Amino acid sequence: SRNVDKDEDGVLTVAGRSVNDIADEVGTPVYVVDEDDLRSRARDFATAFAGWDVYYAGKSFLCTAVARWVAEEGLGVDVCTGGELTVALRAGVDPRTIGLHGNNKSEAEIELALDAGVGRIIADSFDEIERIGRLVAARGRRERPRIMVRVTTGVEAHTHEYIATAHEDQKFGFSISSGQALDALRAVHTAPDLDLAGIHSHIGSQIFDAEGFAVAARRTLQLHAAFAAETGFEPPEMDLGGGFGIAYTSADTPARPADLAAAMRRIVETECAAHGVAVPHLSIEPGRAISGPSAFALYTVGTVKPVHLDGDAVRTYVAVDGGMSDNIRTALYAAEYSATLASRRSDAGPAIARVVGKHCEGGDILVRDEFLPADIAPGDLLAVPASGAYSRSMASNYNHVPRPPVVAVRDGRISTLLRRETLDDLLRLDVG
Ligand code: LLP
């Protein structure tokens, strides 16, 4: 991220504070957010997609401070549970700029969204369309929620299967090819208490291939046009989702928001002109591209163990004070990360290393392959860049490990966004 660099002693600093200061003040493991960087990523999307709405996908990382920051930078917030919705509301985000997702929203979650007056609810099944309509009626028709219909475009996104969402054989959305998507649009449009806002498509995450977005946008606009031709009603909005890839390692080459915006605008305009429909009001939902690169995880090395492989090869297993409970992405998706010695300079040569955690299983790997200085030793600090998305937000208490805090640094000031969980926090739940 932009304000992170190593000083003349090889110490990693962020916005004027060294990681040694941060470790002294809050301990490790800890997530360190470069606040200006996160804000400017949000702003870059708002600027590049001017005229569209940009919703920050809260699932990537949400706390009240981050919800406030993105709102201050002109973004809305995409939430997918009552929990995320509550955080966004608690942060003071204007409910009209919040969209509620989720493939199986409970009645309580729908009611919370109706009470708050969220700007849109994204419907994911016929059960849900019926459920929302029924709840609105039961509440005396005080609200008339704006509904988007989540569709699956059949695009095979080039990403890990678990985070691809637009191929046919998965749980999200209404399939366009089977005709269900058109049926869902009709169902919302004719429901007495619902307003049809438009179509929503999200093809998956950590996607670099612009062609996937292009094909999805084309299929979505074709559906939009077909529905307009049949009913004479052009839904006013359309959302093309998130999923824009980021650089976890130097092998990744993400697109700039300005280039993404230019490509997406071109497709939308061409397709709308071809079908003779007006360009709907568009929106997108980036999460990782805003929160991911702006934070690193900071760990303390606890043990260093050389493991002899076939032949003369040695792999150095560097165990840190966190692991799969604070970042499960390597174990779950074979995600790739890098790591760097953060607390000092080393002139030692490189050793083939693997960064592992403290949990009781062999798959507890944070960084599968990295060169680290051969003199890496207990007490050293290690930083894992690009850890701001889907790390803390997917953290668990496996092995009764408390979850790490999240701190932000700006202009030399360290502030806590989420405090460190304690064993007392965990034991409070144990009421047996
Ligand atoms: N919009 C919708 C409807 C989504 O389902 C998602 C992600 C996003 C936006 C934001 O995607 P992003 O821009 O952050 O890629 N845990 C996985 C990612 C799962 C994402 C689920 N939905 C990971 O760690 O890679």
Image (cartoon, rainbow, N blue to C red):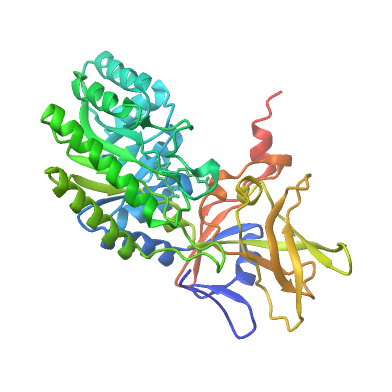
Q: Position of residue 206 (x, y in %)?
A: 48, 53
Where ligand 1 lies, by quadrant? top left
Q: Which residue is situated farthest in the top direction here?
A: 138
Residue 92 visible in this rendered orientation of the protein: no
Measured as percent of width and height from the top left, residue 149 is found at: 30, 32
Of residue 38 and residue 198, the one placed in the foreground of this image is: 198
- In this rendering, the answer to whether 76 lies above or below 25 is above
Residue at figure coordinates x 79%, y 67% from the top left: 378
Q: x%, y% of residue 61?
A: 48, 49
Using the image, determine if residue 83 lies above or below residue 300.
Answer: above
Front one among 172 and 343: 172
Horizontal side of 359 relative to 212 (left or right) equals right
Q: Quadrant of the C terminus?
A: top right
**In this image, 388 relative to 398: left or right?**
left
Residue occupying the point 60% across, 45% down: 395
Give the percent coordinates (x, y) of residue 220: 28, 40
The residue depicted at 71 percent of the width and 71 percent of the height is 371
Where residue 50 sits, quadrant-wise, is bottom left
| Apparent side of residue 367 relative to residue 207 in the rendered image (left or right) | right
- Image-based side of 116 in relation to 27, left or right: left
Residue 385 in view: yes
